[in-house]
Image: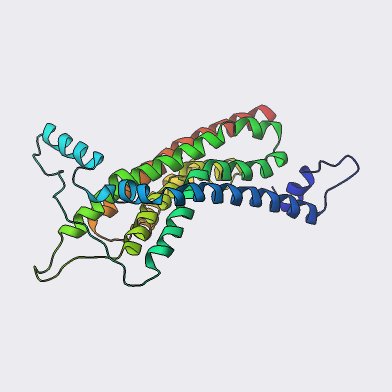
Amino acid sequence: MSLFSFFNKRDTTPSGEMTFIDHLEELRWHLIRAVIAVIICAIVIFINSDYIVSELIFGPTRADFISAKWLCTMGQKIGIGEALCFQQVEAKFLETTMTGQFVASFTLAFIGGFILAFPYIFWEFWRFVRPALSAKELKETRGVIFWVSLLFFTGVLFGYYILTPFMVNFYFNYKLSDQIQIMPTFSDYLENLIYTTAGIGLLFQMPLLMSLLARLGILSARYLRQYRRHAFIIILIAAAIITPSTDPFSLTIVTIPLYLLFEASIIITARIDKRRAREEQQWS
């Protein structure tokens, strides 16, 4: 769909076409409402920042964290002993600047606000795009807000409950010498946590992105199968970028679900290709 056809299909005025400026004005209001939603959610998080930091942000640093206990129990049941049990670490953080905690509180509020408001943000985007779609395209994209939100929050929860505890436990127990004391800044830990939650949540949108490109005729299942190896390298690079660390544990934990999502994208794309082939046969 070209830019001209996109705007042309969005004509809603009874007297004629909307101008390019009119479309920009409409987009501006969608963005403003999305930003307001983020700000409202950010204010709620900022007001409750004490509880959120002590219970949620520092939760993955504790050995009694819910996913840590679950992994330990699972390892014992499958007969590998305490291989999946996290060692007790004394995770303490410091700040080297006077404004460190102040800036970190605003970072936490706005990133948390973005995560909470993500379904609404996408809904506003969808409201802007929807008038340009045909009835058939609307039928094919039914439930898209639900699936986008589900994949995003699944990625966020995966990063929070699985990846972050592994990352914290690995680095606080990795020592070159007993004379070295690990005490990172809180801002550093918060930045890593953002990468492993919001970043993973965005990467989990891969199947929907692939299906969109397939519907536009840009990608096919045959193409994706042909470049499986290249995709694996790209996924590995993306995992290395998202995970603030490059240790094999973190990379493996991130790479496996992302590659599984890529394989799921191939299955979805193959179904789209078959449906398109049947439609072409009917027309011919």
Q: Is residue 101 visible to the viewer in this orientation of the structure?
A: yes
Q: Residue furthest top?
A: 282
Q: Nearer the viewer, residue 117 or 138?
A: 117
Whether residue 227 is visible, yes or no, is: no
Q: In this view, does 280 lie to the left or right of 114?
A: right
Q: Residue at x 31, y 68 (%)?
A: 95
Residue at 45%, 40% (x, y): give it.
151
Q: Quadrant of residue 122?
A: top right
Instruction: Please give the name of the residue rendered at 56% of the width and 31% of the height, measured from the top-left corner.
Output: 143
Q: How is the image coloured?
A: rainbow
Q: Which sits in the foreground, 49 or 64?
A: 49
The one of 184 and 44 positioned closer to us in this rendering: 44
The residue lying at 76 percent from left, 48 percent from top is 7
x, y (%) of residue 196?
A: 36, 52
Spot occupied by residue 265 in the image (x, y as percentages of width and height): 45, 40
Residue 195 in the image, given as x and y percentages of width and height: 38, 56
**Total marks in image:** 0
The answer to whether residue 158 is above or below residue 111 is above
Q: Percent position (x, y) of residue 119?
A: 53, 41
Question: What quarter of the picture does the C terminus occupy?
Answer: top right
